[in-house]
Amino acid sequence: MIFSKDEVQKKSIPENILGVYYFLDENNNILYIGKSINIKKRIHQHLANGRKRMLFSFKKVMIKEMYSELEALLFESQEIKKYKPIYNRKLRKIRNSISVSFKQNKYSYPFFYTHKTSSSSLFDFFSKRKALAFIEKITTQFNLCDKLNGLDKVNNACFKYQLNTCNGACVEKESIIDYQKRFDLCLTHLFDLPNNCKIIITTNKLKTYVIIKKNQVTEFGVQGKSKYFIKYRSYDEFKIVSSFRKKIKSSELIKI
């Protein structure tokens, strides 16, 4: 569905549409992408309180109806990564300054690290001090290695290994498999989501499913209605599912 600026201002959009919406300029460039369970209401909130430059530039609104809120949230996240609308990027830069993510070192041990906010972030913070405090807390809680997580700046074994409280991942003494198990346990704790599973959430008699493999969302949709594969991978989708699952408080888990 596409509505002209005049139609939008005249409140011609139908009531209670759930889905994803796009603000477009005169050349059909996407200025902003959003999601709502009531798109008409949300768009008129933009008109009342939105950015003046965006409101001046947009010439039409395009709407994609969806079946469930979680489906719309995940679809919106993928569309923002695909099109990188200018006003979505500006909002993200304003909100956060430092992010925490994880990757593997050259020996395949996973570790947490800080970086400037990007679409690949795991968690976002307003200061590097808070980001490092977060890493320190989970490192201690799950007996991860201070050196791997950038908390102990040494060339060889970390200080905790000398105290016999680190299992030696910093000097390849602990197996990657054992260390990875604790690291995965940490991620499961942080997001309250098990690894390698299918999650089914039922709302309004519709079953929205999400498939998680290797600590990332790989597929989602509504059973019998839609199916989407994750093309632009980040941990945003992981966070969306975790947050939505906590809000709904009931879901079915199937190990895969």
Image (tube, grey):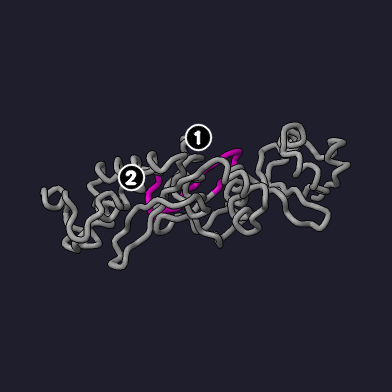
Question: Which residue carries the number 2 mark?
Answer: 135
Residue at (45% x, 55% y) in the render? 216
Residue type at mark 2 is Ile
Residue type at mark 1 is Lys
**Residue 113 position within the rendered picture, expressed as x and y whole percent measured from the top left:** 37, 52
Residue at (81% x, 58% y) in the render? 27
Instruction: State whether residue 16 is above or below residue 178.
Output: above
Q: CA distance from mark 1 to mark 2?
A: 26 Å
Whether residue 170 sits left or right of residue 7 in the image: it is: left
Q: Quadrant of the C terminus?
A: bottom left
Say which element carries label 1: helix
Question: Which residue carries the number 1 mark?
Answer: 247
* Residue 30 in which image quadrant: bottom right
Magenta range is: 192-208
User: Sequence order check: which comes first, mark 1 or mark 2?
Assistant: 2
Name the mark nearer the viewer: 1 or 2.
2
Say which element carries label 2: helix
**Residue 157 position within the rendered picture, expressed as x and y whole percent measured from the top left:** 17, 57
- Residue sitting at the far bottom: 106
Whether residue 237 sits left or right of residue 215 in the image: it is: right
**Residue 242 position within the rendered picture, expressed as x and y whole percent measured from the top left:** 46, 43
Residue at (42% x, 47% y) in the render? 253
Q: Residues within 10 Å of mark 2 (few under 14, many from 20)?
A: many
